[in-house]
Image: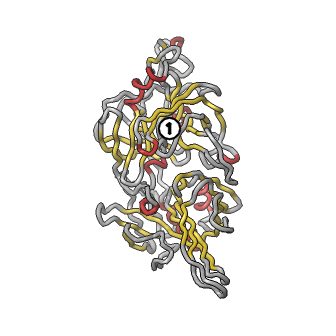
């Protein structure tokens, strides 16, 4: 996906409105799959086809809250843009970065272009998307962000920090792969005020859906991958819009689909295209989002003819256990990779950006790539262990890593949804995951 398309990607969420005194009003807003208009304060109107990325294009709305509307579809979303740059007096070289802030993501690129200085003129230009791990410094806290192709999901801890301080603390971005000598850039004070306003407006409480868990019958000792995949692949889906792609899976007997939060936020659309390996197609709407655990639930407009995955809801996996990941890396549906559980760990230190503290991540080495997000991680019996979320391929200081991938534990997802385990007629027949082995 091009940078222009990603810059055109915006918010996807329903919002609560601020009262005239700046407090969040308790307004009940139905979930329609589109962001509601912000009706307080100044909002700049723009169109999607503006060339946001060119620093030489006349653009006077830096740091302001912008409503961007598509001419074609009428879809709209809200963003805040910030630009920081400096020019070299001697050689005329200008270096800087532009960031696009939404309610869930930040997208950015660094640029350099030539000009004439006091002693010499330089020519040419260079534009580079953010890559690798980036760091946000705000109010004395460091937030590590992991993303792909210049777009990064914002951790809820950062969002909450900005809201609690009304955006009145300094914010800077550190790039692990900076262009030139500058790697740390400040974000403008007025930009922060607009970002805080957007974050405050977007704080929405979703009603937790009723998800029914059923006891499944699975292989007692596990199956070879070639025998297991035909049983579980029909329950895995591809999730697409014209600006994004990801994966998901059927989670309940009534056909609800689970995926990552970052797959369905930032798209600026209300409907998602759903397809299966058997070429079933439908559209779906978001019915629940959990920003902290990075998962979302979609309801398809027409029910897919596929059973929910068996779920390992009673226990966490163990290190060394065989696992399989299924998803749509780069949109290539039905891709299967295999590995082992490397560890089950809390997201502390350099992993804080992936999930809040107290939640367990399933670290594994089954290859995942952009587009795998939201797909299932299963064991050799086909039981769901977690939701694949991210592959860590670089440290904050730029060192390359291999085979370090993470899934949000399905046990913790179900705890967040406050679901009850099904009651078994004969508990002695259940395996460690809570299913019947035959």
Residue 116, by quadrant, is bottom right
Q: Is residue 14 left or right of residue 388?
A: left
Per the image, the residue denoted by label 1 is 417
Q: Is residue 429 left or right of residue 230?
A: right
The spot of residue 89 in percent (x, y) is 66, 83
Please tell me which residue lies in front, 419 or 146: 146
Q: How many marks?
A: 1
Depicted 48 relative to depicted 357: above or below: below
Residue 188 visible at all: no
For label 1, the SS is: loop
- Give the residue drawn at x 51%, y 63%: 101
Q: Nearer the viewer, residue 188 or 36?
A: 188
Task: Identify which residue is drawn at 45% across, 37% down.
Answer: 327
Decide if residue 428 is on the left or right side of residue 52.
right
Q: Residue 401 appears at what percent x and percent y?
A: 65, 44
Measured as percent of width and height from the top left, residue 194 is found at: 52, 69
**Residue 19, x across and y down, in percent:** 47, 66
Q: Is residue 7 left or right of residue 345?
A: left
Q: Is 272 rendered above or below residue 59?
A: above
- Which residue is at the front of the view, 58 or 295? 58
> Can the viewer see residue 119 in this picture?
yes
Quadrant placement of the N terminus:
bottom left
**Residue at 69%, 58% in the rendered image:** 141
């Amino acid at each position: 996906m091009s940078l222009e398309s990603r810059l055109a990607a915006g918010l996807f969420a329903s919002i609560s409105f601020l009262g005239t005194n700046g407090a969040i009003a308790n307004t009940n807003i139905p979930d329609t799959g589109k962001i509601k208009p912000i009706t307080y304060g100044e909002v700049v109107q723009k169109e999607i086809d503006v060339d946001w990325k060119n620093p030489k294009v006349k653009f006077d709305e830096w740091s302001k809250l912008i409503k961007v509307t598509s001419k074609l579809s009428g879809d709209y979303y809200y963003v805040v843009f910030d630009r920081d740059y400096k020019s070299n007096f001697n050689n005329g070289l200008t270096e800087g970065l532009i960031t696009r802030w939404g309610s869930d993501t930040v997208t950015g690129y660094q640029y350099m272009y030539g000009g004439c200085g006091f002693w010499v003129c330089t020519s040419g230009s260079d534009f580079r998307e953010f890559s690798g791990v980036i760091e946000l410094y705000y109010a004395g806290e460091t937030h590590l962000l992991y993303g792909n192709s210049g777009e990064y999901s914002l951790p809820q801890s950062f969002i909450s920090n900005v809201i609690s301080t009304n955006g009145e603390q300094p914010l800077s971005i550190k790039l692990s792969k900076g262009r030139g000598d500058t790697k740390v850039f400040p974000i403008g004070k007025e930009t922060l005020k607009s970002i805080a306003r957007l974050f405050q407006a977007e704080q929405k409480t979703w009603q937790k859906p009723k998800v029914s868990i059923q006891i499944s019958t699975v292989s007692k000792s596990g199956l070879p991958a070639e025998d297991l995949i035909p049983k579980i692949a029909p329950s895995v889906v591809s999730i697409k819009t014209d600006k994004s792609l990801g994966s998901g899976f059927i989670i309940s007997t009534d056909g609800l689909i689970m995926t990552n939060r970052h797959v369905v936020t930032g798209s600026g659309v209300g409907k998602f295209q759903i397809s299966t390996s058997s070429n079933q197609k439908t559209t779906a709407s978001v019915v629940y989002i959990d920003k902290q655990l990075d998962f979302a639930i979609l309801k398809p407009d027409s029910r897919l003819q596929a059973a929910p995955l068996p779920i390992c809801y009673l226990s966490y996996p163990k290190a060394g256990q065989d696992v399989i990941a299924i998803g749509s890396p780069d949109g290539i549906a039905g891709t299967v990779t295999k590995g082992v559980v490397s560890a089950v760990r809390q997201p502390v230190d350099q992993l804080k950006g992936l999930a809040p503290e107290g939640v367990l991540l399933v670290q594994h080495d089954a290859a995942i790539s952009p587009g795998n997000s939201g797909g299932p991680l299963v064991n050799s019996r086909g039981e769901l262990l977690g939701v694949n979320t991210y592959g860590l391929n670089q440290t904050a200081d730029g060192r390359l890593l291999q085979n370090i991938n993470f899934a949000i534990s399905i046990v913790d997802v179900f705890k967040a949804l406050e679901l009850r385990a099904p009651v078994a007629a004969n508990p002695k027949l259940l395996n460690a995951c809570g299913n019947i082995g035959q």
